[in-house]
Amino acid sequence: MIPESFIQDLLARVDVVDIVGRYVQLRKGGANLLGLCPFHNEKSPSFTVSPTKQFYHCFGCGAHGSAITFLMEHTGASFPEAVRTLAGSVGMTVPEENRSPRQQQESARRKAEESRHTQVLDAAQAHYLKQLRASPAAIRYLKQRGLTGEIAAHFGLGWSGTDRHGLSHVFPSYEDPVLVESGLVIESEDGRRYDRFRERIMFPIRNARGSLIGFGGRIIGKGEPKYLNSPETPLFSKGHELYGLWEARQAIRQEGQVIVVEGYMDVVGLAQQGIANAVATLGTATTPDHVKKLLRTSDKVIFSFDGDGAGRRAAWRALQACLPVLRDDIAIRFLFLPSEHDPDSYVRELGSEAFRACLGDAVALSRFLLDELASRHNMDEAEGRASCLHEAKPLLASIPECALRVQIEREMAKLVQLTPEEMAQVLAQQPAKPFAPASRPGEAAPAAGQGASQDVGPPDIGYDFGGHDFHDIPAEESDYADYGHFPSQDGEPAGAGAARPARQEWKGKSDWKGKGDWKGGKGNWKGRRDNDVGGFEGRRTMPSLAKRLLGLLLAHPELVDSMGDQQLEVIDHGPHLGLVRDLIMLAQSSGARHVGALLEAADPDSDLATVLKGLRADILSQEDLPDPQTEWDDALRRIEFDAAKSEMAKLAASGLTTEEGRKRYLELSSRMTVLKGAGIR
């Protein structure tokens, strides 16, 4: 963690006028400087910068902050990145004294790995651009889609070529492991390698800072999948990224809203017609992390989906992801186009003004929520209204306390013919647990061959890690697919209707003989655990201690190397820590360390794979701890303390009638005294 004293010293040395002036044209206006606000569209300046108070403020949109805040909001930099950028500009060095040499070494290793991945992706992008210029077929396809060279250059569109080993001409060592880790090359079981992307228009995917993190590819001939994304890598996680966000950042500020569509071509096609404030999810359902990222760019979000069944299902999943982050100062709406159109085809056929008119008719989130619920029940009968309210309760419970929630609850009361007082009484009688976003309530997932995608997500788990919902892979993903399918045991796509593998019993430490006896492999280990001591079952809230341990292991993989049987035994005694044990076993057996490599090694059907996907972006963005080993040891002592306390309570309840029981009680009491001496209470 960067010391607060350093932050204050840094802000005292930098001049906010100089920092803001690099991006905004400022002019003198009394004691302050004035300019057009970079955070919203305005014709007369309401954006001021105070040289004396060293902050900026916009009287139009309320943007306010210091030089650090400005860099974060305007460039998309994280807090540590903004601090390091400013520190470098004035010759200061961010202090590292609170970090151990091992931690500094691990941090440097991780940064070097990310830098190497970025270099590899940039080299591939240069290759794809060169290939496009030399491919009449690819250029013809883009022209047929109504795209000009200017818009293709703006989004950096390329062409993968048709050679299975095209990248071997780019990278001298085609056997470099980084090519596989970065998702550019696939290595088959027999060791042979080939390019992941072939015969595809290439869409570079950039993060909020404009750095290349992955690719999407659209096939131009026959073949499946139509769309292919990069796999999970140290840089890329589709559940946290939005295509086109970097390219659309200025247009979003100017328009005052962001449009969310379903495909790459929708984003590019809308931009071609002058609607440049659109972004797309990367072939997956909208996640709460997507929504949070969208709301950081604009307080008005419009989801635009096809009007067919698949579009409405996608919209319902997006609504579920929005509920936990609703506030009174934001507006989220839903636009449904005619079933025969997607945004790209609609704007090409009817023009941009027609599409803008549709945006004005988008349905408010509250209206969509109430109408969808009412459509699945007979609201003319008491039973239907009661069933509707029963279905609505967990959705309402997931909305934070705010005026909007009160308004929606009152509208729901009218819908089910209750007074507000009666509605409040019903909700208070049996408080519902917040809803875990899943498939659209009341409808079955499509059967294989009836609209189900080839690329289906992990089992229907729905973990909640402090507001992050990892039920982000729907049973249907349109025609997008990523590397690696999630097959059922019989080899068919494991959609929501597919049978899950039989749940394995977890019997504690005696079932595990050490890392030499565990073979690993995607077919041998599912990693699903019962909700017992040392276990964890889906559709539960991940305990904070389990999350803490998983986060420590993923952020500091060197901890795995020093793990012994004694520590594993302690973990076995902790409730809900089966996934922590699973991660240790996987890391020790496979040799994988970073999250992307662990995902490749884990069984895609396992709970662990689902959790890794959800945790990945948080791990990459978190600050390094000064002493992760101390954090780990402290957590294990807490587990041991709680387990001893629980066992002592059980022994006391039994009356301590046996000599063995009394002896065990004294042993536990002595151990708890030692743990208390170490600061555990």
Image (cartoon, grey):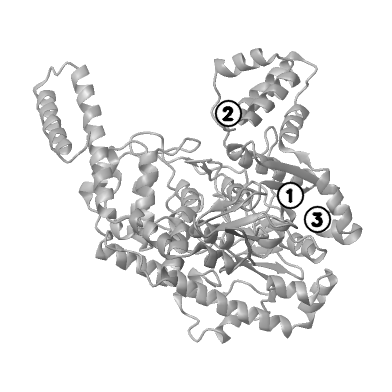
SS label for mark 1: loop
Task: Give the residue type at disc 3.
Answer: Pro
Work out how far the residue at label 3 is from the one at label 2, CA to CA, in angstroms.
33 Å
Q: Is residue 123 left or right of residue 558?
A: right
Percent coordinates x, y for residue 471 in the rendering:
56, 44
Numbered marks: total? 3
- Residue at 68% of width from left, 21% of height from top? 387
Q: Nearer the viewer, mark 2 or mark 1?
A: 2
* Residue 28 spot, x, y in % from top left: 62, 63
**Which mark identifies residue 397?**
2
Dot 3: element: helix
The image's mark for residue 26 is none
Dot 2: element: helix
Q: Which residue is drawn at the image coordinates 75% and 46% (left, top)?
A: 310
Which of discs 3 and 1 lies nearer the camera? The answer is 3
Q: Is residue 350 left or right of residue 644?
A: right
In the image shown, does 201 or 195 lie closer to the viewer?
201
Q: Amino acid at mark 2?
A: Ala
**Relative image position of residue 489 (x, y in whole percent):** 54, 49
**In the image: residue 52, left or right of residue 315:** left
Local crowd size for mark 2, using a 10 Å CA cut-off: few (<14), some (14–19), many (≥20): some
- Few, some or many C-alpha atoms within 10 Å of disc 1 (few <14, some 14-19, many ≥20)? some
Residue 292 visible to an observer of this rendering: yes
Instruction: State how far apart marks 3 and 1 are (Cα).
Output: 20 Å
Is any atom of residue 189 visible in this view? Answer: no
Mark sitting earlier along the chain (2/1) = 2
- Mark 1 sits on what residue? 451
Q: Which residue is mark 3?
A: 343
